[in-house]
Amino acid sequence: MSNNKKQRNKQKKVTITKKTDQKTILQWVCSWTVIGVIVIFLLGTGVAFMIAGWPIIADIFYVISGILFIFAFCRWEVAKQHERKRIIQILALIITTFVIIIVIIFNHNYFNMKPSELFSQSFPGFSFHALIKLNDVSSNHRKYIVDIGKVNGSRLSVYISSDNVFTFSFIDAVGEPHNIQLPIGSKGVPFGKQFYLICELGIDGQSTLLRMLIDGQEIKSIQLPFKVDYRNLDVPGGVIGADLNGENGASFDLYSTLLFETTLTSSAIDKLTKFHFKWHQPSGQRFAFNGKQWMRINRTGRRDLVQNNPSLQPTIMK
């Protein structure tokens, strides 16, 4: 009999030990440390999907992270032992729900914003400006106005396509083209008269923005839900009036040109547009490119234009 009692006592001790171990593991799994790591992971995944342009999937991760946070808070010993624990839990639920709703609203509204609204501030990137007049588009090939970058790398170009479509093109570091195209004429880019052209590429950390403006007004824009790599875009060595090899040039008059390694705000663009039209009359001094003439952006650190071959220099019109 005494042996049977001892065996039963051992079994009870073993059973009690197992229950204690299970409770400890559950407490560890539901601890702030573990749930905090999971919540941070879920929020990070949600941000990744938001940047990638999948807002609905991002919402799911945000909601799950909020539910896990409430669950951990309700199991928190400090909150459970508080004399007003029910009020505290309700407040935590309300605040967490409010934060998740704000995040979801931002998640959807941010990518519904027009690029023109996002350009209320400056972003890293490029802003090409030219006061020009298109003269001849009859050639049956690409006709470059500006070409910056590398032939087999990042490249930013403005050209008239072989079928006479005005094109602002950016090729990223992996060779993927991103284009804005407009017809030439009354419904698109002016032909035969002076206009102020702006082509911008902006990186805001969340997405990539491209837009084309004529006379200070945004004509067309695209927003890519990801950040392109433009770091290898080689500005010194770029060409005005032809492609990077000095071929396939366009016929146009160039009154003025500017290049910024950042986008400009709407107010800055408005001031520059007014300045150019005030100081550059259609019959004023300009460079006339005939399709075979071109100039290269100086590699010495100065951003002036050079052409050492006199036969390739554009004609200065006064």
Image: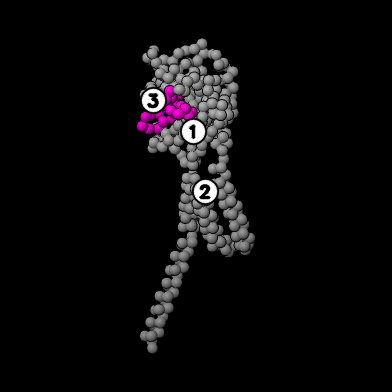
Q: Quadrant of residue 269?
A: top right
Which one is earlier in the sequence, the residue at label 2 or at label 1? 2
Of marks 1 and 3, the one in the foreground: 1
Is 142 a magenta residue?
yes
Q: Say which residue appears at 54% left-offset and 24% top-offset.
A: 190
Dot 1, crowdedness within 10 Å: few (<14), some or many (≥20)? some
The residue that label 3 is drawn on is: 244
Which numbered dot is residue 180? 1
Q: Say which residue appears at 44% left-offset and 65% top-offset.
A: 25
Of marks 2 and 3, the one in the foreground: 3
Establish if 121 lies above or below 88.
above
Q: Are marks 2 and 1 in contact (CB under 8 Å)?
A: no
Q: Say which residue appears at 58% left-offset and 51% top-offset.
A: 101
Question: Label 2, label 1: how many angstroms apart (C-alpha)?
Answer: 25 Å
Of marks 2 and 1, the one in the foreground: 1
Residue 157 spot, x, y in % from top left? 44, 28
**Looking at numbered disc 3 in the image, what kind of residue is underneath it?**
Leu
The residue that label 2 is drawn on is: 55
Does residue 3 show up? yes
Which one is earlier in the sequence, the residue at label 1 or at label 3? 1
Q: Dot 2: what SS?
A: helix
